[in-house]
């Protein structure tokens, strides 16, 4: 059985080392929040599958080759001969400021629909991971995500949902209207502090938002605090984990790494404290290296980042 099934859009990311308007060399990478999570789990030895649509061209081939090279199961990926790949530019504007620009409207990944998800859901998995990016991509993707969440809940597959609000894709109001009902089906909800009001009607206060989610059946609400670590809210109370101090060179992908670490701990049967420690350790690996997922550890590397105690 698969440990994790995740669904979303994988993107071709073109990275600049300076302002895009000035041109210059770009490097090509795989990106995508859900595929980042799948890679994080596969690196740690879990059986992770990613499902979605990719273009039927060289760039779709690139996406698939990257995923397969990382040991991610791509059996259920569909190739779309009609639509282009989703592309993003990651512009390094200054040493500390990066900007993202998407070319993903009408992409193969955005055309995801319910039929793409029937086989992978039927195959089963110990966990289903989704993010709030996918329902922002198109009407059919939104319907597919809602269908997957309900189907998983009915089949007893726990769902984790990372809010991952992207202002370039939809408004906060649209995100709230879509994500608040979905969150009620999730076992784990992952958000940064400024995303909590998108999954509850209880407002932006962390304690109120977490209490509302727990009341609606969410087992664990993970609130990411960046350099301050994270808090986990459950029916038993709240627990804080500090971030592992590292020199941050690239924070993109840190949230997905944190999620992968947490879910890995869950799959290994660790208690909450150790799940959080592994999450913090993976987040540290992600920010300490360049790329959205390239720096993530294999299992024998978990202890490389000191203080992680996450092995
Ligand atoms: O929240 P994170 O920084 O962990 O997410 C990063 C990913 O999917 C990145 O790989 C990018 O492609 C995206 O989020 C996105 O669609 O913005
Ligand atoms: Mg995120």
Image: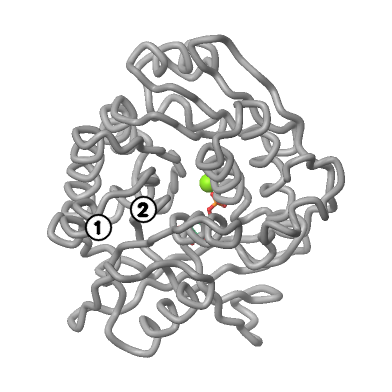
Which label sits on residue 5? 2
Q: Position of residue 96 (x, y in %)?
A: 75, 57
Which residue lies at the image location 35% right of the left edge and 53% below the top edge? 1
Q: Quadrant of residue 285?
A: bottom right
Q: Position of residue 301 (x, y in %)?
A: 75, 59
As helix, strand or loop, the secondary structure at mark 2 comes to: strand
In the rendered view, tell whether residue 310 sits above or below residue 108: above
Q: Position of residue 42 (x, y in %)?
A: 53, 61
Reading the chain from its start, which is encountered first: label 1 or label 2? 2
- Is 309 left, or right, of 25 in this rendering? right
Which label sits on residue 120? 1
Which label sits on residue 57? none
In the rendered view, tell whether residue 307 sits above or below residue 37: above
Along the line of sight, the residue nearer the viewer: 185 or 25: 185
| 1 and 2 marks in contact (CB < 8 Å) | yes
Along the line of sight, the residue nearer the viewer: 80 or 152: 152
Q: Position of residue 16 (x, y in %)?
A: 64, 76
In the rendered view, tell whether residue 61 sits above or below residue 300: below
Which residue lies at the image location 58% right of the left edge and 23% below the top edge? 232
Which residue lies at the image location 34% right of the left edge and 18% below the top edge? 217
- The verdict on label 1 being within 8 Å of ligand 1 is no
Count the marks.
Answer: 2
Q: Quadrant of residue 22?
A: bottom right
């Amino acid at each position: 059985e698969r440990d994790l099934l995740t669904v979303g859009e994988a993107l071709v990311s073109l990275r600049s080392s300076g302002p895009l308007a000035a041109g210059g060399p770009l490097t090509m990478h795989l990106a995508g929040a859900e595929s980042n999570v799948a890679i994080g789990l596969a690196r740690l030895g879990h059986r992770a599958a990613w499902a979605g649509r990719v273009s039927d061209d060289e760039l779709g081939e690139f996406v698939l080759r990257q995923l397969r090279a990382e040991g991610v199961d791509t059996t259920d990926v569909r190739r779309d001969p009609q639509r282009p790949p989703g592309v993003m530019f990651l512009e390094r504007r200054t040493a500390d400021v990066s900007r993202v620009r998407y070319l993903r409207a009408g992409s193969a990944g955005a055309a995801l629909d319910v039929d793409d998800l029937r086989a992978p859901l039927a195959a089963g998995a110990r966990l289903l991971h989704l993010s709030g990016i996918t329902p922002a991509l198109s009407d059919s993707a939104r319907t597919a995500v809602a269908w997957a969440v309900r189907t998983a809940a009915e089949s007893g597959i726990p769902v984790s949902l990372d809010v991952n609000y992207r202002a370039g894709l939809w408004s906060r109001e649209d995100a709230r209207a879509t994500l608040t009902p979905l969150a009620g089906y999730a076992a784990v909800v992952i958000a940064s502090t400024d995303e909590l009001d998108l999954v509850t009607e209880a407002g932006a206060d962390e304690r109120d938002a977490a209490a509302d989610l727990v009341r609606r059946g969410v087992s664990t609400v993970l609130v990411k605090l960046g350099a301050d670590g994270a808090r986990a809210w459950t029916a038993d109370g709240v627990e804080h984990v500090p971030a592992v101090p590292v020199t941050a060179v690239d924070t993109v992908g840190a949230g997905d790494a944190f999620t992968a670490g947490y879910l890995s701990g869950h799959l290994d049967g660790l208690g909450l404290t150790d799940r959080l420690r592994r999450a913090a350790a993976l987040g540290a690996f992600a920010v300490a290296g360049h790329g959205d997922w390239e720096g993530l550890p294999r299992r024998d590397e978990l202890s490389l980042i000191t203080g992680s105690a996450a092995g």
